[in-house]
Image: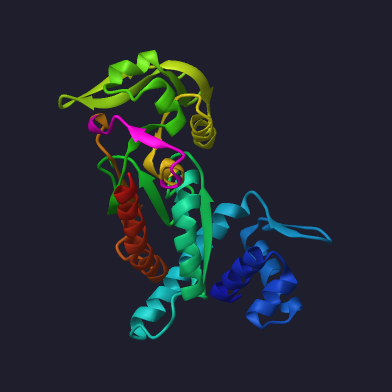
Amino acid sequence: MDKIESLQVFVAVAHEGGFSAAARALGLPVPTVSRKVAELEESLGVRLFERSTRSVVLTEAAQPYYQSCRRLLDELRDADELVSGGHRSPRGELTVTAPVGFGRQHVQPVALEFLHEYPDIDLRLLMVDRLVDLVDEHVDLALRISELPDSSLVARPLGHIKMIVCASPGYLQRHGVPRHPSELAEHPCILWASLGARKAWLFRDEGTDAMFPIRVRLTTTLPESAIEAAQAGLGLTQVTSYQAEAAVRAGTLVSVLRDYESPPTPVSLVHPSNRRVPLKLRVFLDFAAPRLSERLRALEQVL
């Protein structure tokens, strides 16, 4: 059994979702694809796919094996590219994770541009509001909105975002503009947080970070919900600058307490510190980083 060829067939079946589709992608007869997978399963002593008349899906045991095989084949392609002097086009599957809101607003548009530019690279966007372990979850690249602790990850800084307090023009006309964070206790506020979260917001006052209590009229777990409530004139809310950007541009929200905003949070692209960055990741970094930085700079001009 040619192990490399069998792995290529296995990865193709998993990626294409079926034996016939993999056979078309590889230019092989379907019986050959089926035989290669069967030989691999026999050598491993593990069933790799759950087969039915309608679908072929990886077994639970095969999922980490698939990710490892995909990385191995990508590294082999990169080695070929290195030896051939860079004449091969980058190819393979790339997994990128980002927070849901920022990912949908900013990472996905850049990713779509990238896919048009690099037709031989397939992209998997993992947009979740949790800290993803890049190694354990087989993720190539993460966009992080946070201070980065010392780690084995390599970071490329992109810019910053900040938390802003905003309200509708109508609300501010009726109730006045707060001049200091201490006045928030006298205003109805919309809290975007998990239920039971601390009813206070962070500000920088006289060079020191401090929490100021707020009077909560509405608590919601979605920033979009908090923004809509503020646009409806319910009160003030504190959200990230990228979440409020569209409403501020449209004039339906106005930011206040600008002189007391807490320090901005860095935004970075991070990836594991492998000795050699795969070609598909290098081209994505070179493509996405300047575009995301430009988007963050445009955000700073509005807010």
The quadrant of the picture occupied by the C terminus is top left
Residue at the far front in the pictured view = 173
> Visible in this render: residue 298?
yes
Instruction: Write the residue at 32% across / 39% down.
Output: 162
- The image quadrant of residue 205 is top left
Which portion, as a residue range, is magenta?
249-259
Instruction: Write the residue at 72% across / 66% down.
Output: 18
93 is higher (above) or lower (below) than 219: below
Residue 132, position as x, y percentages in the image: 45, 44
Q: Is residue 272 magenta?
A: no
Please name the colour scheme applied to the rendered image. Answer: rainbow
> Visible in this render: residue 272?
no
Residue at the far right in the pictured view = 53
Q: Is residue 256 magenta?
A: yes
Depth order, front residue of 72/285: 285
Depth order, front residue of 137/211: 211
Asked whether, in this view, residue 283 is left or right of residue 99, the answer is left
Residue at the far left in the pictured view = 207
Instruction: Write the residue at 30% across / 50% down.
Output: 301
The quadrant of the picture occupied by the N terminus is bottom right
Residue 3, position as x, y percentages in the image: 56, 72
38 is higher (above) or lower (below) than 149: below
110 is higher (above) or lower (below) than 165: below
Depth order, front residue of 37/140: 140
Asked whether, in this view, residue 49 is left or right of residue 88, the answer is right
Residue 283, position as x, y percentages in the image: 38, 70
Residue 218, position as x, y percentages in the image: 52, 21
Count of residue discs: 0
